[in-house]
Image (cartoon, rainbow, N blue to C red):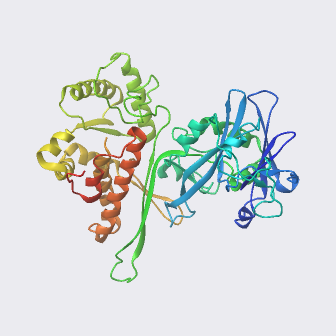
């Protein structure tokens, strides 16, 4: 799709392209203009043949991937667009519908109210005419072939930097929802395309896209379906997505190898996100820092009695969403870490008294285990812990029929290193059920280690600005002086 601008009055048009037409998407346009008040925008969804682009110009020479929403900053309203993204892979190539994921590389903001920011939005681009790629004359609204470097910052520059960091992803097809886990998606009617069905905890543009989703809800069902099929609206998650496709041995009766796909999705919640040291603990609504991470050099437990209700709310939310919960505490016995362990255990004991045995905890001194026996000992020791083994067996996994998306088996399900171990244990359980000969596959476990290592690096860069410390061992199974 392309973005066009016409002036007097100022109107932005997000228009499907001929390539979209070839894909079978409706030939449509989303039209944006400022409303009567400084914080209002008027949005229309029109057939492409009803809009006049004769005097319009292409506001960016990028092919627009979709719209993240509208945001009001002081007296201006900006349209947020994804202007560069690449497809990473398909999570379920054997499913009834493709579930492809793209990584966002560039986000741009265009004002509905003023042309003063157009120079900054297009600082590295030459504006081309409305018929640009597909047609005749190029029209440059500034009558120049180059645009000077900006002398002041765009109001949305901080947002552009964050959203263009490479840590945001979205679903390429409107037929599935990247913000929700597989077990939840399978309970929905797969014949219905509903962009409005998503897990708002993980949709990072939920605030700015809300007005467009409200507009969508007011459309009649046919128009709403066309809007979804055009894929104008993007719901973005932050975290990590990785996928590997590999050949696995076939059974003796069939000489052809089986093509398998292994993928990993991590979704970072936005309700209490931020870098470590700056964002810690739990707020009064039960939202924890970065969902599960809390870290600090000097630990002081503030408001110990007041934090119990927030602690209760946090675990109530987790159990409502995931069922039974088992926490693994990886803190050591140093003074600061011990004080956290004591406070956490006290809170958990009180919460467990109210909730019951569905909530459990295992204490495992990760650093002490590594110091005594190395990283290999962590794998062995965790797999021997009765409390961990029992709960891995209890939680299980979700298995579905690839062709029909029918759930076959649904057994309700701190560091990246330990998650890798638990993930491998669960995957081994699945393979023992379906194909035992795949359990010793070096290719499979090599890709599994690589996915978790990349996941640890990606999340660590979000939390701390640097890669994870243990990923070299996760990748290779060995730890060297270099890391």
Task: Give x and y (percent) for residue 228.
Answer: 69, 52
| Residue at (55% x, 56% y) in the render | 102
Q: Do we see residue 187 in this rendering?
A: no
Tell me, yes or no, if residue 229 can be seen here. Answer: yes
Q: Residue at x 33, y 82 (%)?
A: 252
- The image position of residue 318, as x and y in percent, is 42, 36
Q: Residue at x 34, y 17 (%)?
A: 302
Q: How many marks?
A: 0
Query: In which image quadrant can residue 349 be found?
Result: top left
Please determine whether, in this image, residue 113 is positioned above or below residue 147: above
- What is the quadrant of the N terminus in the image? bottom right
> Considering depth in this image, is 338 or 92 the residue closer to the camera?
338
Q: Viewed as shown, does residue 241 lie left or right of 445? A: right
Instruction: Give residue 70's position: percent from left, percent from top.
Output: 68, 38
Instruction: Give the x, y percent position of residue 308.
Output: 36, 21
Report whether 481 appears left or right of 87.
Answer: left
Residue lying at the far left in this picture: please name it.
372
Viewer-side residue, 210 vs 92: 210
Q: Quadrant of residue 263?
A: bottom left
């Amino acid at each position: 799709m392309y973005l066009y601008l016409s002036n007097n009055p100022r109107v932005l048009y997000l228009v499907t392209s001929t390539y979209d037409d070839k894909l079978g998407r409706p030939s449509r346009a989303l039209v944006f203009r400022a409303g009567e008040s400084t914080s209002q925008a008027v949005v229309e969804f029109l057939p492409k043949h009803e809009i006049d682009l004769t005097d319009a110009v292409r506001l960016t020479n990028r092919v627009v991937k979709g719209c993240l929403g509208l945001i009001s900053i002081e007296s201006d309203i900006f349209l947020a667009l994804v202007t560069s993204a690449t497809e990473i892979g398909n999570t379920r190539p054997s499913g009834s519908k493709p579930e492809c994921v793209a990584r966002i590389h560039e986000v741009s903001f265009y004002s509905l109210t003023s042309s003063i920011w157009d120079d900054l939005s297009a600082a590295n681009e030459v504006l081309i005419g409305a018929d640009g790629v597909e047609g005749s004359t190029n029209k440059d609204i500034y009558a120049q072939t180059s645009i000077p470097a900006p002398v002041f910052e765009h109001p949305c520059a901080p947002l552009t930097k964050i959203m263009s960091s490479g840590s945001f992803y979205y679903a390429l097809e409107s037929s599935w929802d990247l913000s929700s886990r597989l077990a939840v998606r399978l309970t929905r009617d797969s014949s219905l395309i509903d962009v409005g069905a998503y897990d708002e905890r993980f949709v990072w543009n939920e605030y700015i896209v809300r007005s467009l989703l409200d507009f969508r809800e007011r459309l009649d069902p046919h128009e709403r379906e066309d809007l979804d099929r055009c894929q104008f609206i993007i719901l973005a998650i932050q975290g990590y997505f990785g996928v590997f496709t590999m050949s696995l041995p076939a059974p003796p009766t069939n000489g052809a190898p089986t093509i398998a796909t292994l993928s990993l999705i991590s979704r970072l919640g936005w309700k209490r996100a931020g870098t470590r040291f700056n964002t810690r603990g739990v707020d009064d609504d039960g939202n924890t820092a970065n969902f599960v991470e809390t870290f600090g050099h000097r630990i002081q437990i503030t408001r110990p009695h007041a934090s119990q209700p927030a602690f209760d709310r946090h675990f109530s939310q987790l159990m409502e969403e995931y069922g039974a919960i088992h926490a693994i505490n990886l803190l050591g016995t140093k003074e600061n870490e011990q004080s956290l362990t004591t406070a956490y255990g006290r809170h958990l004991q009180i919460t467990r008294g109210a909730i019951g045995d569905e909530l459990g905890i295992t204490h495992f001194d990760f650093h002490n285990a590594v110091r005594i026996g190395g990283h290999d000992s962590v794998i062995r020791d965790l797999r021997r812990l009765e409390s961990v083994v029992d709960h891995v067996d209890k939680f299980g996994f979700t298995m579905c029929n690839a062709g029909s998306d029918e759930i076959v088996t649904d057994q309700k399900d701190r560091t990246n290193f330990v998650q890798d171990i638990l993930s491998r244990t669960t995957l081994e359980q699945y393979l023992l059920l379906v194909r035992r000969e795949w359990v010793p596959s070096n290719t499979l476990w090599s890709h599994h280690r690589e996915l978790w290592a990349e996941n640890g690096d990606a999340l660590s860069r979000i939390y701390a600005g640097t890669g994870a410390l243990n990923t070299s061992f996760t990748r290779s199974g060995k730890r060297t002086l270099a890391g």
